[in-house]
Amino acid sequence: MEIRKLFALVLRNMKCYFKDKFLFFVSLMTPMILLVLFVTFLRGVYISSFEQIFEAAQFTASDDIINGLAGSWLLSSIISVSAVTVAICSNAVMIQDKIEGPICDLAVSPVKGTTVSISYFIANFIVTLLVMLCVLAVGSIYLAIVGWYIPFLDFLMILVDMICAVLFGTLLSGVIESFISTQGGLSALSTLVSSMYGFICGAYMPLSQFAEGMRNMICVLPGTYSVGMLRKHFMSGYVEKLAEMGLPDEGQKALLDGFDGHIYVGSTQMPLWSMYVILLSTCALLFAAYVLIVIFKNKKISHNVVRMTGKASKSKK
């Protein structure tokens, strides 16, 4: 019976999100802004940087590989950043329920508070994943046009990486937004995350461009490793093709080191498995924190409902 209630609440939360056209538009702002920046400015910067690496290695790459490499690098940035920013915007349904009052109606309904909280989490995860799949589909079409060199297995791992990134973004938004109950607070959080998150996780600029101290500090943040995982699987097919065409090992290393195909903490290169461990361990910690917040808030709500019910019964007497 409780599963049916959970399913109904998840559908209700998803409908509330897609029904609000403004909220849906705000969620897509980060991917759209990054796409515009790429077309108008960043694409040329990336291509120039790749050509400099190839010139230093005395190697000439075809235009389709260079364009595809630049596009894949940016697409990994968009997915890793948007997995967090979209999750924060789509979870606004929970805050709107607090502002407009439906959360109070649910508190006195025959639905458990934990069921309501879980429904917000599941709906947020599904909505964010759907948006990210759309972004990946559009990006894949672009890469297919300019130059596609991503093996099928790497593409499957990109999907896995994206699910991990969405899980991280959903849990992070759930924990943070549990403490927000005003529209102003939501707007401030969305603006702050949209403007800063891409920089502090190394999505907008390669980590090699930062000073060593700043780079090591950025590598403390778990979101950096969702970027690194996506970079690895987006770029590996292009690097393998370049190797087949004769790019020396030094040129391959310079390309991967310069554009985050390799993530370093100090002088130590982080293996791919360690990135998964760090990101998923962080998700586990965030999940534990979310569970504790849900338990505490549900006890508080139940206490308030009992107190209000008692006052109402006394007033009738």
Image: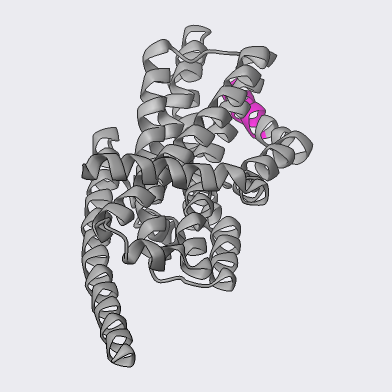
- Is residue 11 shown left or right of residue 43? left
Which of the colour schemes (rainbow, by chain, secondary structure, one colour) is used?
one colour
Q: Residue at x 39, y 49 (%)?
A: 170
Can you give x and y, in whole percent of width and height, for residue 172 in the image? 37, 56
- Where does the C terminus fall, quadrant-wise? bottom left
Give the quadrant of residue 104: bottom left
Can you give x and y, in whole percent of width and height, for residue 240 in the image? 45, 14
How would you classify the magenta stretch by its main secondary structure?
helix
Can you give x and y, in whole percent of width and height, for residue 110 in the image? 26, 57
Q: Nearer the viewer, residue 94 or 185?
A: 94
Q: Can residue 87 be seen in this view?
A: yes
Q: Which of 91 and 46 is in front in this view?
A: 91
Vertical arrangement, residue 141 with respect to residue 273, above or below: above
Asked whether residue 51 is drawn in magenta, I would say yes
Q: Which residue is drawn at 67% across and 51% down?
A: 22
Q: What stretch is highlighted in magenta?
A: 49-59
Q: Which of 301 and 134 is in front in this view?
A: 301
Q: Can residue 225 be seen in this view?
A: no
Vertical arrangement, residue 313 with respect to residue 137, above or below: below
Can you give x and y, in whole percent of width and height, for residue 7 in the image? 33, 39
